[in-house]
Amino acid sequence: MAFLCDTCGKELTVNEGTLSWCDDENCIREFRITHKHDQDHSCDEKDVGYVHLWIVTGISGFVKFNEILADYWAKGYTLKDPGGLKKALSQIGAYIWEKSKNQP
């Protein structure tokens, strides 16, 4: 299964991409699955958080990402982009599901 880059619209493999977001002003937003070089967020580069797609598409990496989100909310951050987060999680979930169906 291929992912679609939120910046250029082209397909990318799990090894070519990142899941990135903006972490600024006590909010998290702009969740995107992109090629590693296509993150292009509307915030300062120092405020971009990311994880390699191959990490977050494994079960332990997916759980760790959810722990990171829980840590943001525990610190009082707000989510200003629920649609972007849901879209990213949907693609990741579909990938994990397809991968699990092909396991013996």
Image (cartoon, grey):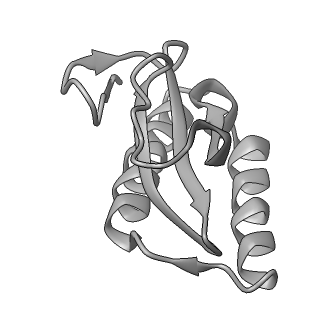
- At 68% from the left edge and 49% from the top edge, which residue is drawn? 62
Front in this rendered view, residue 72 or 63: 72
- Residue 86 is left or right of residue 47, and the answer is left
Name, please, the residue furthest toward the front. 44
- At 67% from the left edge and 41% from the top edge, which residue is drawn? 46
Q: Position of residue 78 (x, y in %)?
A: 57, 81
- At 56% from the left edge and 37% from the top edge, which residue is drawn? 100
Quarter location, residue 6: top left
- Placement of 42 over or under 82, stated as above or below: above
Name, please, the residue furthest toward the left. 9
Q: Position of residue 22 (x, y in %)?
A: 54, 53
- At 81% from the left edge and 71% from the top edge, which residue is drawn? 71
- Residue 66 is left or right of residue 78, and the answer is right
Q: Quadrant of the C terminus?
A: top right
Front in this rendered view, residue 24 or 37: 24
- Residue 70 is left or right of residue 97, and the answer is right
Q: Quadrant of the N terminus?
A: top left
Q: Position of residue 10 (x, y in %)?
A: 21, 19
Tag count in the figure? Answer: 0
